[in-house]
């Protein structure tokens, strides 16, 4: 049982709310159609029910509000618009990523591809799917968690008759197995053909709540549509002649100089208008009511809002925080590896690094660490560090937003588990990128200039730790900045700001004669912690201190500290910002 009670969208300046005090029920074992013309508030009503928009009211799914359901994707399957995802991701990869988000076995993806008739198209990319295939994949996404309730926004819009018939059959089968189906439509005939119950909206308000048979009887009768500047006169003569002939004729006056005449024909209305000299601009037979007439007298109570009784306990506050994947690390790995973007970044970074490395090595004055890092003096960052920052920034790109409730576009999830998964994956990718670049540059130097130019310095562990720290720091800076501002470009800008803006400021702050020395800090730390550290650990501690003392290292640490605080304030608080 789905119960929507008092749904009202947020106030819009100088405009009425898109949804105004909407209350209705969708029962299990039935298909319920939410009918209304474009702009009537159908989509807004669904988003209010799913708590994806701010507003008042509450929706209960089998007695529980959505934010109290432990695994929403297993209770509610959603299809709002097209399938959101990177166009280069495959259909199978998309479903497997959603399996990790919903906490269901990965094998469920292939099962759903078979159910919706896409078993042979699992390797097809999302950007290459036709409209019908996209709808099938969207329905497979909604069914991944085997939900009791399906909510779909215009599922048959733009589909061919064959695809529409298949879709209606699948929805009917879900309802026959005890599920609840709620879908929107703007076509009254489609609503009568598909649904067991029809809820009609007009300007965001409930104007009809009827059984499908009653809806067909009252709303889909044959009628004669008339447009005339003399509506009152023509309505009077038609009713007078019908009473004289003892025929049952109903005349409904509508807006825009229109009449709807039920129980007559075009020939009879045309002859009546001719006999009485009434000018007629339009006269046609119609079946189906594209307008929204008031409900019949018998449905007054339903339309007026015979409100469902909410479960005990009262409605909790809205809005709710966005949900996070149930298995965040698996979700992030599937998201990261599901597209070719990381491979493209690696290839570009490797080519640029090799070119810079070979050119820098021509001058014997360049230190070997600078040559291996491929960091010319005029580059703000080495290519590997910038590539790592780009990978981090893409983690919160719009195409990678976690699809709340299967496929609905919601806010970026900012739970701690998903953040830790993203940090882990991006750090691993940054370290691998840094390692591949250094190894490739070293091999290139040996091939071009001989083996004598790649002799490692004695402090190579400390240099390696600093190189890895720079790459991971840039990756995390890009990730956190993109997560805070919800824009990929913000992550890239944060990475570039470290050497271009923040490092010079830090350098100015710390410039000046040094009167104290940090020599012996490792020994003092050993005395403080009562732990005897090996000589190599002392070297690593000193290397870390030296890195932090450099302007770029200090600027990177400062940037990460600020971004972590900003992320905590904006993303991990109890209420998610809208």
Image (cartoon, helix red, strand yellow):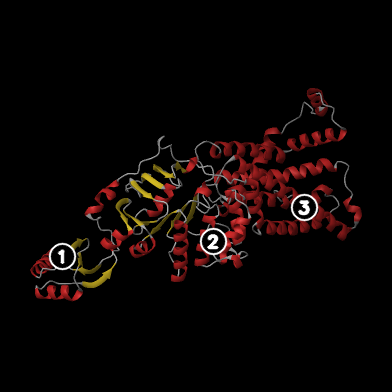
The residue where tag 3 is placed is: 374
Can residue 41 be seen here? The reply is: yes
Location of residue 405 in the rendering, given as x and y in whole percent from the top left corner: 51, 50
The residue where tag 2 is placed is: 137
* Mark 2 closeness class: few <14, some 14–19, many ≥20 residues within 10 Å: many
Q: Secondary structure at mark 1?
A: helix
Q: Earlier in the sequence, mark 3 or mark 1?
A: 1
Vertical placement of residue 555 versus 215, above or below: above
Question: What is the CA distance from the residue labelled 2 to the residue labelled 3?
Answer: 45 Å
Residue at x-position 22% and y-position 60%: 255
Question: What is the CA distance from the residue labelled 3 to the residue labelled 1?
Answer: 82 Å
Can residue 89 be seen here? The reply is: no
Location of residue 544 in the rendering, given as x and y in whole percent from the top left corner: 77, 36
Task: Mark 3 vs mark 1: give the one in front.
Answer: 1
Q: Earlier in the sequence, mark 2 or mark 3?
A: 2
The residue where tag 1 is placed is: 231
Residue at x-position 18% and y-position 76%: 267
Location of residue 372 in the rendering, given as x and y in whole percent from the top left corner: 81, 51
Task: Mark 1 vs mark 2: give the one in front.
Answer: 2
Q: Name the foreground residue: 411 vs 124.
A: 124
Are the residues flagged by discs 2 and 3 in contact, CB closer than 8 Å?
no
Where residue 10 sits, quadrant-wise, is top left
Q: Most extreme residue toward the right, as rendered? A: 452
Task: Mark 2 vs mark 3: give the one in front.
Answer: 2
Question: What is the CA distance from the residue labelled 1 to the residue labelled 2?
Answer: 50 Å
* Mark 1 closeness class: few <14, some 14–19, many ≥20 residues within 10 Å: many
Q: Name the foreground residue: 243 vs 83.
A: 243
Q: Secondary structure at mark 2?
A: helix
Q: Secondary structure at mark 3?
A: loop
């Amino acid at each position: 049982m789905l119960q929507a009670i008092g749904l009202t969208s947020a106030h819009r300046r100088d405009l009425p709310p898109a949804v105004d005090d909407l209350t209705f029920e969708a029962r299990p074992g039935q298909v319920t159609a939410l009918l209304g013309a474009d702009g009537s508030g159908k989509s807004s009503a669904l988003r209010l029910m799913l708590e994806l928009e701010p507003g008042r009211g509450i929706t209960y799914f089998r007695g529980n509000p959505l934010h109290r359901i432990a695994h929403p994707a297993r209770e509610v399957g959603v299809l709002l618009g097209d399938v959101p995802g990177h166009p280069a991701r495959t259909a199978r990869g998309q479903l497997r990523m959603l399996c990790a988000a919903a906490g269901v076995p990965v094998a469920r993806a292939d099962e759903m591809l078979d159910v919706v008739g896409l078993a042979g198209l699992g390797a097809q990319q999302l950007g290459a799917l036709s409209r019908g295939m996209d709808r099938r994949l969207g329905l497979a996404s909604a069914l991944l968690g085997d939900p009791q309730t399906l909510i779909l926004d215009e599922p048959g819009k733009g589909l061919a008759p064959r695809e529409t018939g298949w879709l209606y059959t699948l929805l009917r089968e879900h309802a026959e197995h005890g599920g609840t189906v709620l879908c929107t439509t703007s076509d009254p005939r489609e609503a009568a053909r598909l649904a067991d119950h029809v809820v009609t909206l007009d300007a965001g308000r409930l104007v009809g709540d009827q059984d499908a048979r009653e809806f067909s009887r009252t709303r889909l009768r044959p009628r004669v549509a008339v447009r005339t500047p003399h509506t009152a006169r023509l309505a009077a003569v038609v009713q007078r002649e019908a009473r004289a002939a003892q025929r049952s004729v109903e005349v409904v006056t509508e807006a825009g100089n229109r009449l709807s005449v039920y129980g007559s024909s075009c020939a009879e209305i045309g002859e009546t208008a001719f006999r009485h000299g009434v000018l007629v601009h339009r006269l046609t037979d119609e079946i189906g009511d594209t307008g929204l007439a008031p409900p019949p007298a018998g449905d007054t109570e339903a339309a007026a809002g015979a409100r469902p009784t909410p479960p005990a306990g009262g409605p909790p506050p809205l809005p709710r925080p966005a949900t996070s994947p149930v298995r965040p690390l698996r979700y992030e790995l599937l998201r990261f590896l599901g597209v070719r973007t990381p491979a493209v970044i690696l290839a570009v970074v490797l080519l640029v690094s090799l070119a810079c490395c070979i050119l820098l090595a021509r001058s014997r004055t360049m230190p070997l660490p600078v040559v291996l890092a491929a960091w010319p003096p005029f580059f703000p960052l080495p290519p590997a560090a910038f590539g790592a920052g780009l990978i981090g920034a893409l983690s919160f790109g719009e195409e990678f937003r976690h699809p709340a409730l299967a496929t609905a576009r919601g806010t970026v999830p900012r739970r701690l588990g998903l953040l830790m998964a993203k940090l882990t994956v991006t750090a691993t990718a940054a370290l691998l990128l840094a390692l591949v670049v250094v190894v490739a540059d070293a091999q290139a130097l040996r091939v071009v200039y001989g083996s004598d130019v790649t002799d490692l310095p004695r402090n190579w562990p400390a240099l390696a730790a600093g190189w890895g720290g720079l790459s991971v720091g840039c990756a995390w800076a890009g990730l956190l900045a993109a997560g805070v501002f919800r824009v990929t470009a913000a992550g890239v800008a944060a990475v570039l700001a470290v050497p271009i803006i923040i490092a010079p400021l830090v350098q100015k702050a710390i410039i000046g004669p040094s009167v104290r020395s940090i020599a012996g800090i490792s020994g003092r730390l050993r005395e403080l912690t009562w732990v005897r550290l090996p000589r190599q650990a002392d070297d690593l501690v000193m290397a870390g201190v030296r890195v932090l003392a450099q302007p770029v290292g200090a600027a990177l640490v400062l940037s990460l500290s600020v971004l972590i605080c900003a992320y905590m304030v904006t993303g991990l608080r109890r209420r998610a910002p809208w």
